[in-house]
Amino acid sequence: MNPSEIVKLFLIGSFVSVIPMIYMGIAYNKLNCHQQGLMRIKYAYIPMILPLMYGLVYVVLTLALRPFISNDMLRLFVLGAIAGEIYSLIGHYIFKLPETLFLMKHPNMVHIIAPIMYAFIYGLLVYPLEKVILK
């Protein structure tokens, strides 16, 4: 795999970070000042961290899964489920986002919701994007 393909994969993965920034921004705007103060990470850092994290996870998982899953769409669904679980673990246990940003009463539900959601995002949104960019 050449460096230009790795850069393209990183950019594709970084693009996916737009989706959580949208729903996280909506949730953040609904919080009052006290609730915003309870967050472990300042919201302003999230747009800097997410594209880097999503791009890195996408590159690593793509390189890890390509030898094992030849069907691109299936690989992206599996990649999305694994990535969703990674994102939910980081968001839940490191940043406490389900409790502080989304005010979830059952924050462990994020570990069920995220893999399903990201499997569909990667399988249905990233698949055509990858086909166009990685021709």
Image (cartoon, rainbow, N blue to C red):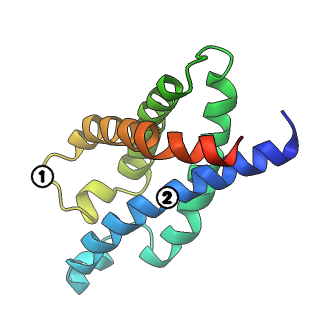
The alpha-carbon separation of the residues under discs 1 and 2 comes to: 25 Å
Q: Residue furthest top?
A: 68
> SS class of the residue under badge 1?
loop
Residue at mark 2 = 17
Residue 3, picture quadrant: top right
For image coordinates 64% across by 32% down, the residue present is: 62
Q: Which residue is drawn at 35% across and 49% down?
A: 92
In this view, 52 is above or below 120: below
- Amino acid beneath label 1: Lys
**Label 1, residues with CA under 10 Å away: few <14, some 14-19, many ≥20:** few
Residue contact between numbered discs 1 and 2, judged by CB atoms under 8 Å: no
Tell me which amino acid carries mark 2.
Ser
Image quarter where the C terminus lies is top right
Q: Mark 1 points at which residue?
A: 105
In-front residue for pair 64/130? 130
Direction from residue 103 to residue 8 in the image, left or right: right
The x, y position of residue 38, in whole percent, is 30, 72
In this picture, is 37 found above or below 112? Answer: below
Across and down, in percent, residue 4 comes to 84, 48
